[in-house]
C-alpha cells in the first residue's frame, strides 16, 4: 500500500501516525471478517446445521497442519535470527515473510458446507475504518438499523401558531364566563379555549439493494503467492468501489416513483435553434438538427422532439431556446447533426437567459438515448433529486430564471457580479418558511474558486474586501486566500455557513443543508439518515470455474426526514 494512498483512505485522520494506526485497524478488521467467514460464524446456513469441527466440502489440502507448522517455524525463527548478522537476518526473515503470505492465503481459502450454502464476509467493521476523502456525504451521514421491506415514517409539518405546514394561527384569548360553544369535543360544546390544529404527512420508501462484483483468476492468485494476496486486494477494491458508488447515489440517485421516490424526469421543451447574436463558433453551418435531453446525475431522459433550422449564420455558436425546464433536471444533453435522425452528443449545458449556447460542433459522439435513464428502478433519491423538487425542498431555484441575464461571477460590471446573493436569497427563504438555520453549502470546486476570485476582486475591482498578509518570516510569505464560509444574513444565530466541496457535484448545482433540527420534541435529530436492513457484506461465490468470484451487498435506503429545512440552486453560471 503506497503511503500516498493513506490520506485518501483515512481522510478524517489528522496525523501520519494516526493514519498508520487506522491502516492496521483496517487490516485487522478485514482479517477478522475473513476469520469469521472461514469459521462459519457469518453464514446463510442455519445455526447448528454443520457440526462443530466438521469440514464438509472442498478444503485445500493440509490446511490445519501447514498453518500450525508455519506458526511453529515463525516462533523458532525469532530465536534463531538473533544469532545471525544483519544481512543474514534480513534474508532469513524475508523468506519467512513469503511463507507467512502462503499462510495468509491458506487462511482465506473457501470452505463451503455444500454448493448451495454461501458464507458471507461481514464488511461493516472494515467499512467503518475506511474513510475515503472522496465520500464526504457517506462519511458524515449517520446509519441506523432497518427491518422489513420499506421505511415508513410520519411527520408533523406544523401546528397552530408555528407558522409552518399551512396551519392557521389562533389567538389564545378567551372569556371563561361568556365564551361558550366555540370548541366542540365530540358532541359537546364546552367553555374552553380553541382547539389547536396539526398538519402531517406519511412517507413510505421501499428498501433497495446495492451490489458490485469482482473476479480473480486462479492463475493470478497462484502467480502472486508470496507477493500480494490477489483475493484480499479484490475484497478491498470491492469495498472501496461500493462505498464510492454509494456516495454518488447519495448525491444524485433517483428512484422509481412507484417505490416512494421522485421517478422519471421529462425532457425540456425546446424551441427552434438559432445562431448566437455574437461570438465565434466552430463547425456549425447553415443547417442543423438537434435533440435535447434532461440530465439528472443518475442519467438522461428521452429527448424532446427533433428541432431544425436551415437559416443559421455559418461560423457562429448555436443557440437553443429552452422554454420549459422540468423539475429534477440538473443540466441538458444536446445532440446535433447536419442530417435528420443522426444527431450525436455535443455535451451537457446549463441555460443562460433561457438558452443553451453550444460554441463548437463535435462529430462522432454517442447517439441519442433510446431509453429513459433519468431514474433507476432499483435506486433511491439522493440530495439533488429531493432538494430540486419544490414540493419537498424548503427552497429550489434555477439561476437563469431567478436572475435572468446575470452571472454569479465573472461579468465586467458590479451590477452583474452578484456574488453570494443566490445563497443569501435561499437562506432568507428557508428562515421565512420554517425558521431554518442551515450549517452547510455544498458546491463544486470551480464555483468555490470563482467565489474566492470574486472576493479578491470585490466585484468590479473596488477595494471592498482586503486580505491582510501576516508578519513575514525567514521562510517567506504564503500567498492565496480561500473562502471557507458564507455569513448567513438571515440567521438568528449569526451563523457562518461552511462551504464544502463535493468532488462529484454536477456543473452549476449547489445545495444548502440543515444537518440537524434544533427543535425540542421534534423526534428528528439528523435530517438525513441511512437506514440499513443489511449493512455492508461480501460473498464468495462457489467455485464453478477457474476463478474466485466475489460480490458486495447492501440493503436499505436513504431517508430525508426534513427536506423543508434545506435548499437547492441549479444552473449557476
Image (cartoon, rainbow, N blue to C red):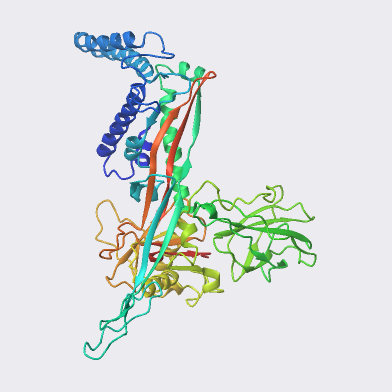
Residue 391 appears in the picture as rendered? yes
Number of marks in the image? Answer: 0
Residue drawn at the location 34% of the way across and 80% of the way down: 169
Q: Up-down: is 518 above or below 362?
A: below
Location of residue 84 (image quadrant):
top left
Q: Residue at x 58, y 53 (%)?
A: 374
The image position of residue 353, as x and y in percent, is 59, 71
Can you give x and y, in whole percent of width and height, for residue 558 in the image?
42, 51
Is residue 121 toward the left or the right of residue 254 in the image?
Answer: left
Location of residue 565 by image quarter:
bottom left
In the depicted structure, whether residue 441 falls above or below residue 502: below
The answer to whether residue 561 is seen in the rendering is: no
Q: What x and y, as percent, mark residue 17? A: 25, 37
- Residue shown at 25% from the left, 65% from the top: 520
For the N terminus, which image quadrant?
top left
Determine whether 496 is above or below 105 in the image.
below
Residue sitting nearer the eye, 418 or 205: 205
Q: Nearer the viewer, residue 299 or 417?
A: 299
- For the residue pair 536 and 87, the one nearer the viewer reads as 536
Name the outermost residue toward the bottom: 178
Q: Position of residue 61 (x, y in %)?
A: 40, 9
Task: Classify residue 54 by image quadrant.
Answer: top left
Amino acid at each position: 500500500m503506497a503511503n500516498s494512498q493513506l490520506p485518501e483512505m483515512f481522510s478524517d485522520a489528522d496525523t501520519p501516525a494516526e493514519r498508520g494506526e487506522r491502516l492496521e485497524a483496517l487490516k485487522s478488521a478485514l482479517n477478522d471478517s475473513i476469520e469469521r467467514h472461514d469459521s462459519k460464524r457469518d453464514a446463510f446456513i442455519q445455526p447448528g446445521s454443520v457440526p462443530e469441527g466438521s469440514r464438509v466440502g472442498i478444503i485445500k489440502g493440509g490446511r490445519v497442519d501447514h498453518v500450525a507448522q508455519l506458526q511453529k517455524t515463525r516462533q523458532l525463527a525469532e530465536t534463531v535470527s538473533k544469532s545471525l548478522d544483519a544481512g543474514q537476518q534480513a534474508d532469513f526473515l524475508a523468506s519467512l515473510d513469503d511463507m507467512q503470505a502462503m499462510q495468509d492465503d491458506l487462511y482465506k481459502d473457501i470452505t463451503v458446507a455444500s454448493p448451495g450454502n454461501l458464507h458471507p464476509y461481514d464488511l461493516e467493521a472494515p467499512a467503518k475504518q475506511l474513510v475515503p476523502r472522496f465520500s464526504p456525504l457517506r462519511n458524515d451521514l449517520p446509519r441506523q438499523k432497518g427491518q422489513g421491506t420499506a421505511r415508513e415514517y410520519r411527520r408533523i409539518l406544523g401546528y397552530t401558531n408555528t407558522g409552518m405546514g399551512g396551519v392557521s394561527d389562533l389567538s389564545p384569548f378567551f372569556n371563561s364566563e361568556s365564551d361558550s360553544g366555540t370548541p366542540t369535543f365530540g358532541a359537546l360544546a364546552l367553555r374552553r379555549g380553541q382547539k389547536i390544529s396539526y398538519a402531517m404527512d406519511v412517507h413510505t420508501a421501499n428498501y433497495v439493494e446495492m451490489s458490485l462484483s469482482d473476479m480473480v483468476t486462479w492463475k493470478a492468485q497462484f502467480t502472486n503467492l508470496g507477493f500480494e494476496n490477489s483475493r484480499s486486494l479484490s475484497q478491498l477494491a470491492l469495498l472501496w468501489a461500493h462505498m464510492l458508488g454509494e456516495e454518488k447515489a447519495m448525491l444524485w440517485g433517483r428512484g422509481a416513483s412507484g417505490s416512494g421516490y421522485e421517478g422519471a424526469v421529462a425532457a425540456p421543451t425546446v424551441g427552434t435553434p438559432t445562431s448566437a447574436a455574437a461570438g465565434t463558433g466552430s463547425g456549425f453551418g447553415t443547417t442543423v438538427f438537434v435533440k435535447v435531453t434532461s440530465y439528472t446525475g443518475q442519467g438522461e431522459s428521452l429527448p424532446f422532439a427533433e428541432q431544425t433550422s436551415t437559416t443559421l449564420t455559418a461560423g457562429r455558436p448555436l443557440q437553443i431556446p429552452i422554454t420549459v425546464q422540468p423539475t429534477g433536471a440538473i443540466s441538458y444533453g444536446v445532440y446535433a447533426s447536419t442530417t435528420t435522425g443522426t444527431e450525436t452528443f455535443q455535451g451537457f449545458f446549463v441555460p443562460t437567459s433561457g438558452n443553451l449556447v453550444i460554441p463548437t460542433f463535435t462529430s462522432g459522439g454517442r447517439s441519442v438515448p433510446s431509453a429513459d435513464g433519468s431514474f433507476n428502478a432499483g435506486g433511491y433519491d439522493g440530495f439533488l433529486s429531493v432538494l430540486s423538487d419544490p414540493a419537498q425542498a424548503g427552497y429550489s431555484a434555477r439561476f437563469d430564471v431567478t436572475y435572468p441575464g446575470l452571472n454569479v461571477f465573472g461579468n465586467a460590471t458590479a451590477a452583474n457580479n452578484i456574488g453570494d446573493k443566490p445563497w443569501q436569497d435561499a437562506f432568507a427563504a428557508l428562515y421565512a418558511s420554517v425558521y431554518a438555520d442551515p450549517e452547510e453549502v455544498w458546491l463544486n470546486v470551480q464555483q468555490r474558486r470563482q467565489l474566492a476570485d470574486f472576493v479578491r476582486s470585490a466585484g468590479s475591482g473596488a477595494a471592498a474586501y482586503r486580505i491582510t498578509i501576516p508578519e513575514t518570516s525567514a521562510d517567506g510569505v504564503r500567498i492565496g486566500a480561500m473562502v471557507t464560509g458564507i455569513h448567513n444574513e438571515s440567521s438568528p444565530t449569526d451563523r457562518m455557513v461552511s462551504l464544502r466541496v463535493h468532488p462529484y457535484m454536477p456543473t452549476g448545482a449547489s445545495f444548502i443543508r440543515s444537518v440537524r433540527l434544533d427543535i425540542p420534541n421534534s423526534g428528528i435529530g439528523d435530517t438525513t439518515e441511512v437506514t440499513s436492513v443489511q449493512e455492508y457484506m461480501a460473498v464468495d461465490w462457489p467455485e464453478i470455474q477457474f476463478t474466485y468470484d466475489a460480490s458486495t451487498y447492501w440493503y436499505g435506503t436513504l431517508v430525508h426526514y426534513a427536506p423543508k429545512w434545506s435548499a437547492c440552486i441549479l444552473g449557476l453560471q
